[in-house]
Image (cartoon, rainbow, N blue to C red):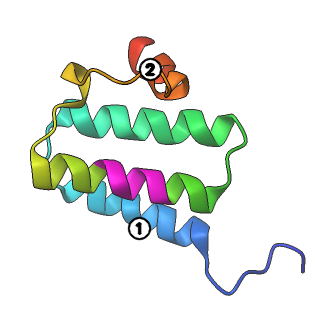
Amino acid sequence: MKDWRSIDYKKRLEKESKILERSPISKENKRLILRYRNWRLANGVSIPRVLREVITLRVLCERFDVDLPRTNLPVNYPEIRACWSSR
């Protein structure tokens, strides 16, 4: 019973992955977002937090045509830089 939540974040994360697949952003951006998602989950970050980050990255790429591999990430986000640079 301790896994019960009024919002099923696992299902929402799966749904967001499907939305990401159909998104018009580049394959490289999709690959990096999925890799980042997996990396964050593997490091014990909560599913709701990872969901928010994945949605934010997808929308950023869609609306502002951001190319993640060419983005200069600020030094105060070492976890993102580590994930991107380990490609």
Task: Characterize the local packing of mark 2: few (<14), some (14-19) or many (20 or more) Cα atoms within 10 angstroms.
Answer: some
Rendered residue at 35%/55% (across/down): 56
Q: Residue furthest bottom?
A: 6
In the rendered image, which quarter is residue 34 located in? top left
Residue 59 picture quarter: bottom left
Tell me which numbered mark, 2 or 1, is placed earlier along the sequence: 1
Residue 65 lies in the magenta stretch: no
In this picture, is 81 found above or below 26?
A: above
Q: CA distance from mark 2 to mark 1?
A: 26 Å
Residue tagged 2 = 81
* Amino acid residing under circle 2: Arg
Q: Position of residue 53 (x, y in %)?
A: 45, 51
The amino acid sitting under disc 1 is: Lys
Q: Pinpoint residue 81: horizontal percent, then vertical percent.
A: 44, 20
Which sits in the foreground, 15 or 63? 63
- From the viewer's perspective, tell me whether residue 1 is left or right of residue 47: right
Q: Relative to residue 70, is residue 10 drawn left or right?
A: right
> Would you name the residue on which mark 1 appears?
15
Q: Is residue 87 in view from this perspective?
A: no
- Residue 37 x/y as whole percent: 49, 42
For the residues carrying marks 2 and 1, which lies nearer the camera in this image? 2
How many dots with numbers? 2
Q: Which residues are magenta?
A: 52-57
Residue sitting at 62 percent across and 57 percent down? 47
Q: Is residue 7 visible?
A: yes
Please state, as top left, top right, bottom left or bottom right, where the N terminus lies in the image: bottom right
SS of the residue under disc 2? helix
Front position in the image: 55 or 23: 55
Q: Residue at x 38, y 24 (%)?
A: 74
